Image: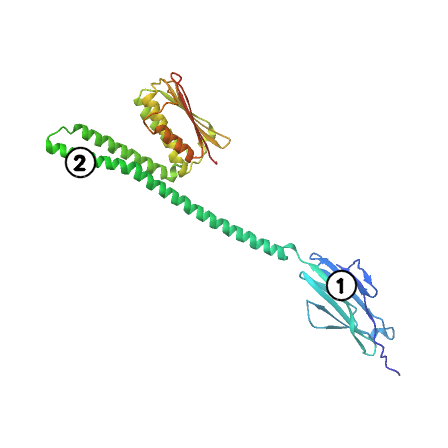
Amino acid sequence: MKMNRRIPTVVITNFKIFDQQAAVMRNGDMLQPVRLSYKENMITFDFAALNFTNSILNQYAYQLEGFNGDWIYCGNKQSATFTNLDGGTYIFRVKAANNDGVWNEVGTEVLLIVNPPYWKTWWFYVLCVLVVASILYALYRFRINQLMRLQQIRSRISRDLHDDIGSTLSSINMISSMADKSVTTGKKTSELFQTISHASSQALELMNDIVWSINPKNDKMEMIIIRMRQYASEILEAAQIPFTIEMNEETKGIILPIEKRKDFYLIFKEAINNLAKYSNASQATIRLKYVGRILSLIISDNGKGFNVDQKYQGNGLKNMKARAESLKGDLYIFTGPGEGTIVTLNIPVTP
C-alpha cells in the first residue's frame, strides 16, 4: 500500500452570520475581506480539504489572529464559530492534513474587519476628552467669574463706604470740633448740633441702604417693592403728595441681583426725593412692569416740571444717569415747565 503524500488544497466553503448564509466575494479560492458590524457578533466559517481519498480521515486546524495566537486542532470538524468579537482587524487561517497526515501548512486565510460601536472609536474618545475638558474649563471660568464678581461687590461696598459714609463721618467730625470750640468761646452751638444730627441721620440711612443692598434675602422683587413703598410713603406723605403704586404680576417673580439692586433702588430714591422737593405736585404714580425681559420703572407726577436743558447745581440727575449706565439700561426724563415730569428707567433683567 502506498502512502498518500499529496498536500491537500484548503478552501473556505461557507461564511455565516447568526447561522444564516452571508454574501461574500471570492477571488479564486480566496475570500475577499469580510467587513462586519459590531452587532453581527456570531459568525461561522466552514472549510474543507480537497482530498477525496478516505476524506473522513482529513484533519483540520484553525486560528484567528488578533483573537488567539495558537492553532486549534479540531480533528475532522469542518467549521469554526466565534462570538462577541471586539472591534478591530482579524485574520482567520485554516490548514488541513490528508488521510495519511500530510499537512498543508500554508492553508488559506481571509481578512475579517469588525467595525466597533461608536462609543469605542478613537474619535468618540477624543470627543469625550474635549467635552470633559470643556466642562472643566467652563467650571474654571465660572469660578473665576464668581471670584471677579465677588471682588467687584467688595470693591463697590468699599467705595460706597468710603464715599458716602466716610465723607459724612468726616463732616460730623469737623462740625463736632467746631461745636467744641464754640462751647469754649461761648458761641451758640444749636445750629452746629442740628447739623451733626442731620449728618448722623444721613450716615445711618446710607449704612442701612448698603446693608440692605448686600443682603441676599432682598434679591426678590417683592422685597424691593416693599422697601420702595415704605420709602415713598415716608417722603411723599411728608410732602403731602398722594401716590399710587402699580405693577404687573410678572414683576413680582423677578430676581434682581446685588450688583443691580443697589443702583436701581438709589435711582428710585433720587427720583422720589426730587419729586418731593421740587415738583409741587398734587398726585404721583409709581409703575413697575416687566415685558420682554425689560424691567421698567416709571415715576410720574402732575407738578410744575422743569427745563431739562437747564444746568442745575446738584448732581442728582448726573448720578441717576451714571447708575443707569452701570445697569446697562436707559434713563429717560420727559418734562417741561408746567407739564409735570415722567422719569422712566428701563434695564435688562434675566428672570
Residue 141 vertical position relative to residue 272 in the rendered view, above or below: below
Residues marked 2 and 1 touching at CB (< 8 Å): no
Task: Describe residue 275's horizontal placement relative to residue 113 as left or right.
Answer: left
Under mark 1, the amino acid is Thr
Secondary structure type for disc 1 = strand
Location of residue 182 by image quarter: top left
Q: Is residue 91 visible?
A: yes
Amino acid marked by disc 2: Ser
Give the foreground label among 2 and 1.
2
Nearest the viewer among 293 and 8 is: 293
Q: Secondary structure at mark 2?
A: helix
Describe residue 79's horizontal placement relative to residue 226 as left or right: right
The residue wearing badge 2 is 177
Residue 186 rendering spot, x and y as whole percentages: 10, 30
Name the residue located 22 percent from the left edge and 30 percent from the top edge: 195
Please name the residue that numbered disc 1 is placed on: 44
Label 2 environment density (alpha carbons within 10 Å; few <14, some 14–19, many ≥20) = few
Residue 100 circle label: none
